[in-house]
Amino acid sequence: MEVVVKNISKRYKGYKAVDGISFRINQGEVLGFLGPNGAGKSTTMKIITSYISPSEGDVEVGGYSVTTHPEEVKKLIGYLPENNPLYLDMPVMDYLEFSANLQGVPKEKMHRRVREMLMVCGLGGEKHKLIGELSKGFRQRVGLAHAMIHDPQVLILDEPTTGLDPNQIIEIRKLIKDIGKQKTVILSTHILPEVEATCDRILIINKGKIVADGTPENLRKQAKGRELIRVKIEDGKTEDIAVALRGLSSILSVEGMPGSESNFEIQGDKFAAPKREIFKMCVEKGWTLTEMVPFETSLEDIFHDLTIN
């Protein structure tokens, strides 16, 4: 089922949390939705789920508009928020039955659906325990089961692996990928390796605007004109070295490395031979270049570049 976001904006007292963004998510696609805190991710997801209305624009989920048919949209979506709201004094099985009833699951299908969610989310051994007695990881599984209990066509997950141990994270990643083969999934997380392991496509938002949209591989290709280099230069003052590095035509940015006055992390124009310029500069200045190590551009580097300002 397609989700089509059409030029949506959201204002709060003159401040634009979301500023005219548009994108489309196709059925069978897992979209990684990334951005720093305050970028507009949560606001966008709340608009898609019909929890709040956009100030401008519209979202269509399966052909239904969030502004004119919000109740129909809600039926099609399962949502796991970052702060997982649960009734801690209810047993897991009772809570899932309660959730299924709220979501309109037919009574004749309810028990089968609850059993399926207990199995899929690995809650079989916890089904009679009070939710308040569970670890944070198992509570997260209960939230995921709640989001999927009505078999939604679109699943929106906000930090779904928070509090899980490494084995549970692997299991949940596999579950999300399996779900994504048949449904539309939006995954918001700050764990970038999780995005690479799980998502087909990445969308990065910053200050309410989309700054990148593509597969992990395509985003890397777009960044391949840049080269990340870590250097160690001695026999000169740190400030003088930093100024000289920034003065090179092939250097795009220079940052000092924590814990060392002589180490620098440099982004250079790959096609302008930054390593050659750095070496030549050290010879001319009489400084000793003791280390120069190039690194492959990672998703973390791309995210940092697009959201630092």
Image: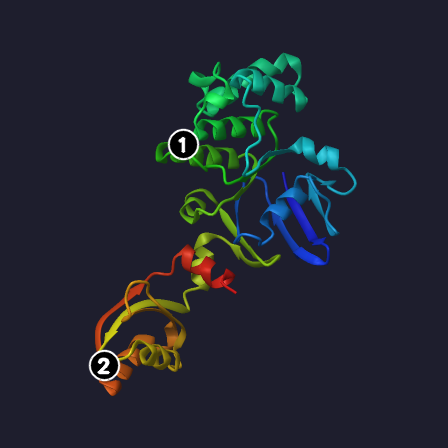
Task: Specify few, some or many for label 1: CA neighbours under 10 Å numbering under 14, 14-19, or 20 or more.
Answer: some
Taking depth in this image into account, of 143 and 194 the one nearest to the observer is: 143
Which residue: 47% across, 25% down? 121
Side of 127 relative to 102 (left or right)? left
Q: Quadrant of residue 247?
A: bottom left
Cβ–Cβ below 8 Å for labels 2 and 1? no
Mark in the foreground, 2 or 1: 2
- Residue under circle 1? 171
Q: Which mark is residue 105?
A: none
**In the rendered image, the vertical position of residue 44 relative to residue 156, given as above or below:** below
Q: Position of residue 5 (x, y in %)?
A: 67, 49
The N terminus - image quarter? top right
How far is the residue under mark 2 from the one under mark 1?
51 Å
Where is residue 156 shown, x and y percent of the image?
Answer: 58, 38
Residue depicted at x 75% and y 51%: 55
**Image quadrant where residue 69 sits:** top right
* Side (left or right) of 79 relative to 272: right
Q: Amino acid at mark 2?
A: Trp
| Residue highlighted by disc 2 | 287
Counting from the top left corner in percent of width and height, residue 135 is at: 43, 27
Q: Residue at x 48, y 16 (%)?
A: 127
Q: Which of the pair 211/11 is nearer the observer?
A: 11
Q: Is residue 129 above or below residue 177?
A: above
Identify which amino acid the numbered label 1 is placed on.
Glu
Image location (x, y in percent) of residue 29: 54, 42
Badge count: 2
Residue in front for this viewpoint, 104 or 289? 289
Which of the two residues, 127 or 135, is positioned nearer the viewer here?
A: 135
Disc 1, SS: helix
Q: Is residue 238 left or right of residue 77?
A: left
Tag 2 secondary structure: loop
